[in-house]
Image (cartoon, helix red, strand yellow):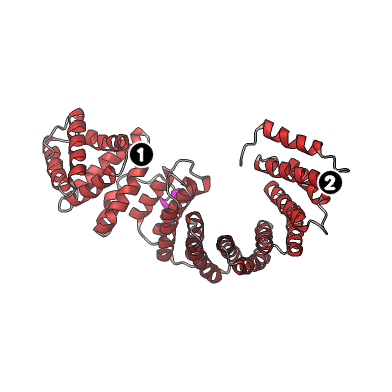
Amino acid sequence: MIEESPEALAALRDRTLRYPPARYPVQHATAQFHLGVALTEAGRYEDAARALAEAVRLFPADQMPGEQAAAANALGAAWRARGRLDEAAAAFVQAREGFERAGRAPEVAAALHNLGLVEVQRGRPQVAARRLAEALKKFEACGSAAGAAGAAAAARELGAAHLAAGDVERATTTLAGAVERAGAAGSEAGVGAAANLLGLALLAADRPDAAVEAFRRSAGANPRRVRPAGYAVAKANLALAWRRAGDPDRAGLAAGQALATPTLPDAAREVALEACGGAEPSPGALTAVMAEEAESEWAALARQEMNRWLDLGEGGREQEARAWLDGVASRPDRAPQLLAAWFGALLELPTASMASLLGSVLAALATRNDAAQEVFRRWSSRATVTFAVPQLVRLHDMLEQLGEEAGVGGPWR
């Protein structure tokens, strides 16, 4: 929702007064259209609907069918946002008919797409599927970039409608195609949304391993700092898929990453907690998962988990730091490799973030005995030699500075 300033809305209202409808019907209709769109964006749906209904009434259907259809389409969007689904459906039907008369094929497809979404909300997924399938065909026929993007979105919603109707097999096939369509259209957000729905369809088909891959792709297409809500939903669903696949460590790792995401949706929180048996995941899953994964996957695992640590409170980060040290110490034969992957993830972060995370682990190390500290320094020395000289110098300097502050001085080289 976009907050429109009172001044901007006042200016749009003034424009409607400047053109009395009896004398300037088209100009008044145009002004009401822009006012209605602005009011919709401001969340004032009833006011928006009144303005847009006036625009629909005043645009001459025989001379300006496209403009009238655009106003009807906007009216449908306002009514849909308000939850007035019958009125929304009628407006989208009128929009489709007007766009057909105007010969505006992409807009016909868009109106059908909107109509399909309304039918889903009305609890009629099979009717929605027919509308969305028709929209998909019309988007495909456009042969343009906009048509490709529209086809990807229509395929995604069509798959969701099949899933809501209980046709899991058709939903899976359609959503797999929607993922590829979104990728071809260059829409990472579309890939993320379609892959998440594909994962849900695969879970419904009792294919948790395949669902894991779909949710992984969804999370990758929704960067944590760019689309946090999409990332959290994908990670929560990934946790559930890992739990159903019989892997509690990976379920806990994914659930923790979902739960620590800023602006976590309530539904994602519930799913993440369900994946952990109703409780917050225990710290320390990172080393357990890394030990089970191929070493080529360690860097990505460490990177994702360090992004989570940055969003934890001080207490949560202290717990994770202690658990990380325990996990590394319990795997002495692979400790240098584990630390190398972890150091690599830290080096990708801004200096302040890197220092914060490294400082937490060194503070936890300071609570251990001298022998444990010496072993950790030795492993760290073996891990750091794998880095290029600029990274090596940066890492050594920070280890020495933060180690001294934490009371676990060198040598670190």
Query: Which is the main secondary structure of the residues drawn in magenta?
Result: helix
The image shows residue 399, relative to residue 203, as above or below, that is above
The C terminus appears in which quarter of the rendering?
Answer: top left
Q: Secondary structure at mark 2?
A: helix
Question: Which label is found at residue 143?
Answer: none
The residue carrying mark 2 is: 25
Q: Quadrant of residue 314?
A: top left
Q: Amino acid at mark 2?
A: Pro
Residue at 41 percent of width and 54 percent of height:
220
Q: Residue furthest right?
A: 22
The image shows residue 21, relative to residue 113, as above or below, that is above
Q: Is residue 262 left or right of residue 411?
A: right
Residue 22 falls inside the magenta stretch? no
Q: Secondary structure at mark 1?
A: helix
What is the span of residues highlighted in magenta in the rendered image? 271-277
Front position in the image: 407 or 185: 185
The residue carrying mark 1 is: 310
